[in-house]
Image (cartoon, coloured by chain):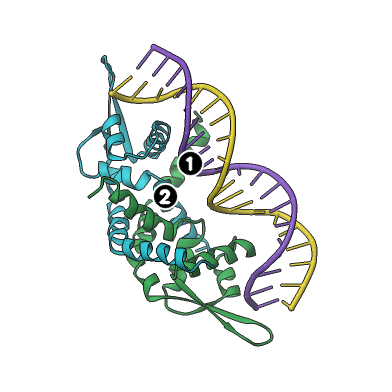
Chain colours: A cyan, B green, C purple, D yellow
Amino acid sequence: MQKNLDQCQFAVAMDSIVGKWKPIIIHHLLQGKPLRFNELRRLLPDITQRMLTLHLRELEEEEIITRVVYPQIPPKVEYSITEYGMSLTPIIEALHQWGATHIERKKLGEAKKQIEPD
Amino acid sequence: MQKNLDQCQFAVAMDSIVGKWKPIIIHHLLQGKPLRFNELRRLLPDITQRMLTLHLRELEEEEIITRVVYPQIPPKVEYSITEYGMSLTPIIEALHQWGATHIERKKLGEAKKQIEPD
DNA sequence: CTGAATCCTTATGGATACTG
DNA sequence: CAGTATCCATAAGGATTCAG
C-alpha cells in the first residue's frame, strides 16, 4: 500500500467533477430526464456555448453522460446520465447540500472583506 | 429564486475543495490529530513546499483549518481542522469512497488508450 | 523547521464570429 | 438547433533558490 493511494483516489474523483460547470450539469442530468443542448443552456444562463460543448464532451469522454444525435432537421441532440454517472450521486448531493447550507456564510465573508480589507 | 442559485451553491462548495492537494490535506486533518508542516509533507510525498504552503494558506483563509505557531527554535507549526472544516466530512468522504471504488476503472481506461489511441 | 521569492509552463475559461 | 474556430486573459501548478 503506497502512501499516495489516497491522493490517487481523490484525484480520480476530482477529475470527474472539476470544471466550473460540471457539477451542475451532472446535477441536472441526475434528475433523470434527458436534456437537449439548448435546454441545458437555459438551465445554465451564464454558460457560453463553447464551455457547454467542452464540458459535455469531457463528461461524455469519461462515460458520465451519453450523447444521442437524432439525424433530423433541425438537429436534435439529447444528453443523459449513464449508470456510471449515477454513481456520482453521493458526491453531487453532498456538494449541493453543503453549498446550500454554507452559501450565506460565504456571502457574509465577502461583505466583510469589503468593509475591512486586508 | 433565481435560476443560478444551484450554480452558486456548487461554486461555493467547490471553492473549498478545488486544488490539487486540498482534498487530501483536509482528509488527513479530519483524522483529528493536529499535524506539523513536515508531517503533512511526509503524508503527501509528491507535493512541493510551495504548493503545501499555498494550499494551507488558502484553507486557513477559508477558515477550514487553523494554523498555530509555537514560538521556539526550531520553529513548530501545527495545523488543525476547524468545526467549519469538519462540516466538509460528507463531501471528503464521498470523494474518497468514490475514488476507491472507481480507481481501477480509471486505470483500465488509461491502459486502453495506450492500445487504441484515438 | 517552516517557510518566502522568482521564474516558468500549462490549464482553464471566456468573447466573438461563423456554420451545416 | 447545435455546434466550430480563433484569439485572448487569467489561474493553477511546479522547479529552483534563498532565509529566519
Image location of residue A74, percent across then percent down: 27, 16
Check the image and report above or below for A56 versus B52: above
Residue at the farthest bottom position? B72
Q: Name the residue beneath numbered marker 1.
A: B110
| Residue for point 35% across, 67% down | B89
Identify the element where label 1 is drawn. helix
Badge 1: chain ID: B
Describe residue B116's horizontal placement relative to residue A44 as left or right: right
Residue labelled with disc 2: B104
Q: Is residue B48 visible?
A: no
Residue at 34% x, 69% y is: B87
Q: As drawn, which residue projects farthest toward the front? A: A115
Relative image position of residue B81 (x, y in whole percent): 44, 75
Secondary structure beneath dot 2 equals helix
Q: B67 or B102: which is nearer to us?
A: B67
Q: Is residue A51 above or below residue C19?
A: below
Where residue A65 appears, x then y in whole percent?
Answer: 32, 38
Q: Pointer 2 indicates a residue of which chain?
A: B
Q: Using a 10 Å C-alpha cutoff, classify the residue at mark 2 as few (fewer than 14 neighbours), some (14 to 19) or many (20 or more).
A: few
User: For the residue marked with disc 1, what is the amino acid?
Assistant: Glu
